[in-house]
Image: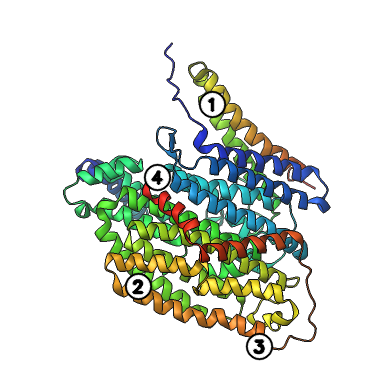
Amino acid sequence: MDMITIPAVNMTPILPEIFLSVLAMALLLINVFIPSGQKSYLGYISFVGVVAAGVLVGAGWGAPVESFSGSVVQDNFATFFKIIFLLSAGLAILISDQYMEREGCNHGELYPLILFTVVGMMLMAAGTDLMTIFLGLEVMSVALYVLAGFNRANLKSNEAGLKYFLLGSFSTGFLLYGMALTYGATGTTRIAKIAAIVGQMTVPSANIMLVAGMLLMLTGFAFKVAAAPFHMWTPDVYEGAPTPMTAFMSAGPKAAGFAALLRIFLVALPTLQVEWSQLLWVLAVLTMTVGNITALRQDNIKRMLAYSSIAHAGYALVGFAAGNGTGAAGILFYMLSYTFMNIGAFAVIILIGKKGEANGTVMDFAGLGFKQPALAVAMSVFLFSLAGIPPTAGFIGKFYLFSSAVQKGYIWLAVIGVLNSAASVYYYLRVMVYMYMKEPTEDFEWTRITPPIALSLLISVAGTLIPGIVPSVILQFAEQAVKLI
Amino acid sequence: MLGAYLPILLLVIVAVLFGLVSIVLSSLIGQKKPSPVKLAPYESGCTPVGTARERFSIKFYLIAMLFILFDIEAVFLYPWAILYKKLGVFGLVEMGTFIVILFVGYIYVWKKGALEWE
């Protein structure tokens, strides 16, 4: 009887994923055996788990390993993104407990779901095969759909979950169709092999199947990173989802979408760069402009940050349209800084909010500067960074992204980006005007700041300010990370 | 290269045409002798009672969903059973992992009370 040859499998590249999956399953079991009042412990355990996974991931820096016949890789690019995902998950876990307690939906399933999302995102960043990337995307998305609708008693949260699920699965269809066509045109799903085969084509842009595949994949990922015109779901989902999950969703999964986009387009399809960079040029301009213009008129702060999140995806697309090393490093740096500043801002929103998602407008920030000076300073740091004002990480990130466009000769793209950035200052500073120049409403009652949220705010402020003042600490890692692709 | 797919295209065209032609032809030249019994919707041979668009308990969905989930598990066990000896220890470990993961889900579902009808 002939034996089936079993491939030698090196588990090192997916060790953090295995660890997190096992932890998530263990938490799921612990959850059903402990009484409902003690779900916070699950949060603490998962936070420690995320930190431990961070150590595991960090240990792989600078030691590239390939496994599963080249469908998963541990390189600096994947490692950098994995750290972003773990940071966003860790911060989201820290800000979850108090909010979920207040909204009365402190179900223990929250933490395993967050961990599963992270596992999916990590596979997306580490995958070097279209199938691995797709599997990662599905693991991430399915867990996220549930997280968006996590507040079951709240109609808006239900709406968010359902909307995200329906539109998300539809866009996944586009993505899968694109991958199938790419496979049809090249005969492989391995990214490196696609690059080799496309490189041998005399005129790759004349291969209609390949171009159609590329376009459909771009559509699928553009949906995941909330780029216009595929952004319609974002405001409703971000507004309806529980606030900590909105924070998480806007940081981690967006970065994961960019990780997969960068790997597929820069590694597998560099020969088509002339074609896709023109598309991304248009996409970037649309995304920035739609996001910023619409955000100007929002009073609901979560909705405003949802549109701002669309605009930020646009800034990152500027670097992508440039498609050079500076642009890619800029995206990595920007995604990391965006994680800090955005989750930080959402942490403050959680503290402002009241039971039943009340107090969610810009006007509710009135007088924050007098009542809670420290919190107002933190919020100001995040808002300055989101607006791209020095000395914050947001400024350095935008500077990098726009200068990559200038390097590539896309002067107009950079100009439009800067103009957009200027327009965005209006709606970010509007919050600050309310914080420092308006009288507080009389029935002003303070939510207490619990230690986990305080810790998350501290990390976020540090993560926003330190790379803004000494950018090289992060930039050198970002530049090393993109050298491989 | 696309020429290789021509038979599939032909198959699709023939299949669509066959369906259309048989429906159209039977409605054009077939005999029609309708009676109330013939026009009633088919319900396993019983006389239909009430409308089909009734509301029914969400529990049915849950049970159906869980059934599919664990049914798939059984489907995956069959190929393993056939290749059990060829796959050896590797297959045992892989399937063990798979079953353990599903078992975690089973315990979760059980403890959550999703299997209780009342």
Confirm whether circles 4 and 1 share one chain.
Answer: no
Confirm whether circles 1 and 2 share one chain.
Answer: no
Check disc 2 and give the amino acid type: Ala
Dot 3: chain letter:
A
- Name the residue at 52% across, 78% down: A295
Task: Tell which tag, 4 or 2, sits nearer the viewer.
Answer: 2
Query: Which residue is labeled 4 in the image?
Result: A130
Task: Tell which tag, 4 or 1, sits nearer the viewer.
Answer: 4
Task: Tell me residue A472's x, y (percent).
Answer: 47, 58
Task: Tell me residue A251's x, y (percent).
Answer: 54, 60
Marks 3/2: CA distance?
A: 33 Å
Task: Tell which tag, 3 or 1, sits nearer the viewer.
Answer: 3
Marks 3/1: CA distance?
A: 70 Å
Check disc 3 and give the amino acid type: Met
Dot 4: chain letter:
A
Q: Tag 3 or tag 4, which sits nearer the N-term?
A: 4
In the image, is A106 to the left or to the right of A221? right
Within-10-Å neighbours for mark 2: few <14, some 14–19, many 20+ = many
In the image, is A169 to the left or to the right of A98? left
Marks 4/2: CA distance?
A: 32 Å
Task: Tell me residue B92's x, y (percent).
Answer: 57, 22
Check disc 4 and give the amino acid type: Leu
Q: Is residue A227 visible?
A: no
Query: Looking at the image, do the residues carrying marks 3 and 1 touch, with CB atoms under 8 Å apart?
Result: no
Query: Which residue is labeled 3 in the image?
Result: A437
In the image, is A434 to the left or to the right of A220? right
Secondary element at tag 4: helix
Secondary element at tag 2: helix
Query: Looking at the image, do the residues carrying marks 4 and 3 touch, with CB atoms under 8 Å apart?
Result: no
Q: Which mark is residue B78?
A: 1
Task: Tell which tag, 1 or 2, sits nearer the viewer.
Answer: 2
